[in-house]
Image: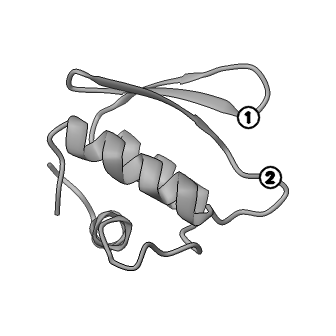
């Protein structure tokens, strides 16, 4: 993994307990890109992500920029399945 400081902090925040509800979605997307995930933009706000052998579909939050706790939990579970932890 070749993460910059902001991406590393985003990864650490995703694995924080209690689960935070104010992580900017663009920061999560930047983390996926830094991890060299395959990202496929779907209809509307859907985003397909493939990393290692894990696949998931996420919905970009709108109109707000921050993810809710449920979305952060889903991202965390996806990253664990992909073998990524801080």
x and y percent of residue 39 in the render?
47, 27
Q: Quadrant of the C terminus?
A: bottom left
In the displayed image of the protein, which residue is found farthest to the bottom?
A: 18
Q: Is residue 1 left or right of residue 51?
A: left
Q: Is residue 8 above or below residue 82?
A: below
Label 2 sits on residue: 62
Q: Secondary structure beneath disc 2?
A: loop
Tag count in the figure?
A: 2
Badge number at residue 45: 1
Location of residue 60 (image quadrant)? top right
Location of residue 51 (image quadrant)? top left
* Nearer the observer, 33 or 11: 11
The residue at the point 40 percent across, 79 percent down is 18
Q: Secondary structure beneath disc 1?
A: loop
The residue at the point 18 percent across, 47 percent down is 84
- The residues bearing labels 2 and 1 have C-alpha atoms spaced at a distance of 8 Å
Tell me, yes or no, whether the two marked residues, 2 and 1, touch with CB atoms within 8 Å.
Answer: yes
Q: Does any portion of residue 30 appear in the rendered image? A: no
Badge number at residue 23: none
The mark that comes first in sequence, 2 or 1, is 1
Q: Is residue 59 left or right of residue 2?
A: right
Q: How busy is the neighbourhood of tag 1: few (under 14 within 10 Å), some, or many (20 plus)?
A: few
């Amino acid at each position: 993994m070749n993460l910059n400081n902001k991406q590393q902090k985003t990864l650490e925040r995703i694995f924080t307990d209690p689960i935070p509800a104010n992580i900017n979605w663009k920061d999560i997307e930047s983390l996926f890109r830094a991890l060299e995930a395959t990202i496929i933009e779907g209809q509307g706000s859907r985003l397909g992500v493939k990393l290692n052998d894990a696949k998931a579909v996420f919905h970009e939050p709108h109109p707000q920029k921050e993810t809710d706790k449920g979305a952060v939990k889903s991202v965390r579970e996806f990253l664990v399945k992909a073998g990524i932890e801080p």
